[in-house]
Amino acid sequence: MVPYLKMFIFSNIGGGTAYHLITKRLLSVTATRKLLNTSGFIVASLALMTLPIFRTSPGAVICSYVALGFLALGRAGFAVNHMDIAPNIHDTGDALHFQLTWVLTLLNWGEDFSLSHFLASLSIKVTIGEEYAKWTYFQATFCESSSSSYLQTMKVPVGLVVFYVAQELGMMESGYAWIATAWLSTVLDSTSPLSSKTANSIQGALNLRPLTPDSERKRAFISRWNKLSNGSIGLNPYGLYAYDTVWMLAHAINLLLDQGGTISFSNITSLGDPKGGGTVNLVALSILHDRSPLNPAYDLINIIENGYQRIGYWSNYSGISVVPPETSSNRSTLNQQLTHYSIKLLPYAVPYEFVLFGDGLKNPSYYVFVNMIASGKFDAAVGDIAIITNRTKIVGFTQPYIASGLVVVASVRRLNLRAWAFLKPFGPLMWGVTGAFFLIIGLVMWILEHRINYEFSGPPGKQIVTILWFCFSTMLFAHASLTSMLTVQQLESPITGIDTLVTSTEPIGYQIGSFAQNYLVEELNIPRSRLVPLGSPEAYADALKKRTVAAVVEEKAYIDFFLSENCMFSIRGQEFTKSGWGFAFPRDSPLTIDMSTAILTL
């Protein structure tokens, strides 16, 4: 914690010093930046040079703290704009709040630390300007992270500022995953339309939105609300919660008065101090239970160019699904009857009886299963039956209810990049071009500025130093973006897809009973001696870890479930077959068409 505190203190000193020197016109912007850069880096260098002299721990620690502090002071100089525009620091409280927030973020304290109460105790105004978001604390936080997946829990306006900066650093593009909590959906629902800057910065993020079941009453209320507000204020789920709460309270009061009751007013001790806040027990309203939402459920939405797209649902009792979760009130031990069978949607009654295929211990053969339909032993087959050419010759299939092709999954490992890995792309030609631009940029700056900017005037020696200084500072600004690209977690595997797998001589795993075995042998001409049968996801993981197989070829629907619990493996390449799962019936059975229609209806 102490090193971050040192950096925090010296950064504030640098910012305050720059603000004072520029606003009081004691030094120009350029001179102020040079002063901070030079003094900070020189003192830090001297501290690091004297570090070996000390043989005791206290002396070495002091030198390290001095180096860190003055590095932060020198780095603060780069935040000063070179175009004679001073940083827009409204007051010391703004800068203090911004930097305290990001010191806490670097320390991983998150929201456990009550920053608002801390600032309130210091009587400091709490505001955050957008300019501060472009300071190096954001860049340092992102660039030092080796992760490409981020969970964004900050609320507006800080949450949107984080997305602005992430977009500027190129971290909203392919290769990154952003998940925002419910605060972002509130912004989407309440603000219409979003500014183009905000819409572009959050595009591609995943978001959780509290689910409110659709109903005629809800649609009618939203329609009345839009007419009342003329569409200027959107309605988010919390607005619906508030409406329901007020409606229930009004209904309860009305019943009380109808029954001859009276209303009296008094203080409620459970509310506590109105200024300090408190808790109210809303169990009677079926909204909260033990301070948590009752039966919580969320929409999973993906933010796209023209708004958002719902891609699924989540609840604590049904998990992730593509259909809205049912209310848990119908899921008691006395009511376990499943609903929404496609067979229930047929226009006529079909009596049926389920018969388990297999012994439940090992995977049965799907070819045997399908042949039992053709031989008349079974009237139909339901389950994860892949629709492939050989099977369609003997039975009829319904419309696929899920798409699933074959993919290759293999072990991956992280690439450990060295500290100087950012120099890796620089070959001799690149160094030559960089050196040329180093001089060209400085020369262009001098040509454009030396007639109107006194900073570029003076003897030739001073002008040459100024040219080199601007080139040096410009290259350092580009360092953060290059580092962010090269420090993203890189995954490597010798298997890049089905092509490299076929040309190699490594063993290949497949699921027992799957059509993958015949496809690999008959279509891709892979020798059977290379194929290793595996019976479960645990067997997949064990074989890949022990290098018994180089990769596993399996249907993507299974692999998606497998990867949700095994993050050390990855899909390599693209799906190389296109198929799906469907229900099997005897050929020319009228149920095939009717069940297909029912599946599409679902």
Image (cartoon, rainbow, N blue to C red):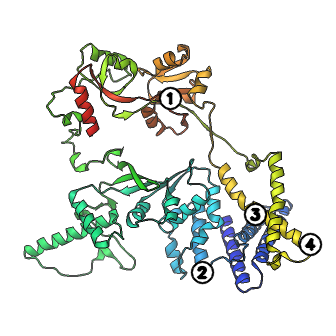
Circle 2: residue type? His
Q: x, y percentage for residue 273?
A: 36, 79
Q: Is residue 54 visible?
A: no
Of the numbered discs 3 and 2, the one sitting upstream in the chain is 2
Find residue 460 and name its label.
4
In this rendered view, identify the residue nearer to me: 113 or 543.
543
Q: Are marks 1 and 2 in contact (CB under 8 Å)?
A: no
Q: Nearer the viewer, mark 4 or mark 3?
A: 4
Q: Is 280 left or right of 2, judged from the image as shown? A: left
Q: Is 84 left or right of 296, judged from the image as shown? A: right
Q: Residues within 10 Å of mark 1 (few under 14, many from 20)?
A: few
The residues tagged by marks 3 and 1 sit, at their Cα atoms, a distance apart of 47 Å
Of the numbered discs 1 and 4, the one sitting upstream in the chain is 4
Find residue 302 and name its label.
none
Q: x, y percentage for residue 348?
A: 14, 32
Q: Quadrant of the C terminus?
A: top left
Q: Nearer the viewer, mark 1 or mark 2?
A: 1
- For disc 2, the marked residue is 90
Image quadrant assignment for residue 105: bottom right
Circle 1: residue type? Phe
- For disc 1, the marked residue is 576
In this rendered view, identify the residue nearer to me: 61 or 301.
301
Circle 4: residue type? Pro
In the displayed structure, would residue 22 be above or below residue 110? below
Q: Is residue 340 visible?
A: yes
